[in-house]
Image (cartoon, rainbow, N blue to C red):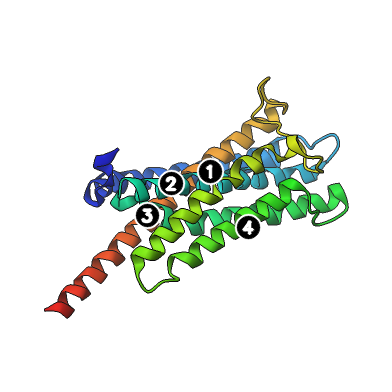
Amino acid sequence: MHRFANPNQFLRVANPALPWCAWLAGISIAVGLYFGLFDSPPDYQQGETVRIMYIHVPSAWMAMFVYGGMAIASATALIWKHPLGFLAAKASAPIGACFTAIALLTGMLWGKPMWGTWWVWDARLTSFLILFFLYIGYIALVDAFDDPAQGQSRASILALVGAINLPVIKFSVDWWNTLHQPASVIKMDGPAIHSSILTPLLIMIFGFTVLYLALLIVRIRGELAAMRVRNMRLGQGEG
């Protein structure tokens, strides 16, 4: 993986991959939404409101997945000084924050008819809100210093420390008494969801994952272009 840390080598792989990721994301999300909204049956308890799940669950999955990727990228930036490590984490942060916001909003829309309230301060919801604040804190910290290197190192440390929250989110429904339903897709004894609901849900998760990859490539390319512009301006200023 060290050779892909070179920006030019990364672009040689990322540029051809971008249209494939974009098309896969668009097709997967369209197919997943069709089967989720029009073909899958309503839940015997939740009725039609269960269809919020096809946006809520993939968004929640991506919120955690993206932050995990940020933590790994930050570790490579701090330990091995990979040129793309910090850029990947920085490019991921706004995407992950959007996924987290969507998960929180759809969760509130789902919680109102199911629980009778928009919000409860239980372990799962509170730890997920903390994840959103970690994203916002990272985005703010990156540009909080006059020295870009200092902002990069502080933000990377925050990403690594914040990763502690990921297992808390995952196992909160097992560790504490919470209104949130326990895991029903990833279980030791297999999924507890009927295939008519599980299939479009998995398609949506795949679509959201490929969408993230497409957006990540676009944002990293933008960061690399901005970095080149800054270097050119610095070179002209010194000349």
Which of the marked residues, 4 or 1, is nearer the chain's N terminus?
A: 1
Residue at image point 76% right, 54% down: 109
Q: Does residue 98 appear in the picture of this structure?
A: yes
Q: Secondary structure at mark 1?
A: helix
- Residue behind mark 3: 86
Secondary structure beneath dot 4 equals helix
Disc 3 versus disc 4: nearer the observer:
3
Q: Residue 149 at what x, y percent from top left?
A: 34, 63
Question: Which residue is rendered at x = 24% and y = 41% of the image?
Answer: 3
The reply to whether dot 4 and dot 1 touch (C-beta < 8 Å) is no
Dot 3 amino acid type: Phe
Quarter of the image where the N terminus is located: top left
| Amino acid carrying mark 1 in the image | Phe
From the image, which quarter does the C terminus lie in? bottom left
> Mark 1 or 2 closer to N-term?
1
Residue 215 screen position, x and y as percent: 44, 53
Q: Which residue is labeled 4 in the image?
A: 101
The disc at residue 39 is none
Eyeballing the image, is 128 above or below 151? above
Q: Which mark sits nearer the N-terminus, 3 or 2?
A: 3
In space, the residues marked 3 and 2 are separated at their CA atoms by: 16 Å
Q: CA distance from mark 1 to mark 2?
A: 11 Å
Q: Nearer the viewer, mark 1 or mark 2?
A: 1
> What residue did someone put label 1 on?
65
Instruction: Specify which label sits upstream in the sequence, 1 or 3.
Output: 1
Q: Which residue is mark 2?
A: 213
Q: Is residue 148 left or right of residue 60?
A: left
| Residue type of the residue flagged with mark 2 | Leu
- Dot 1, how many residues are within 10 Å of its Cα: few (below 14), some (14-19), or many (20+)? some
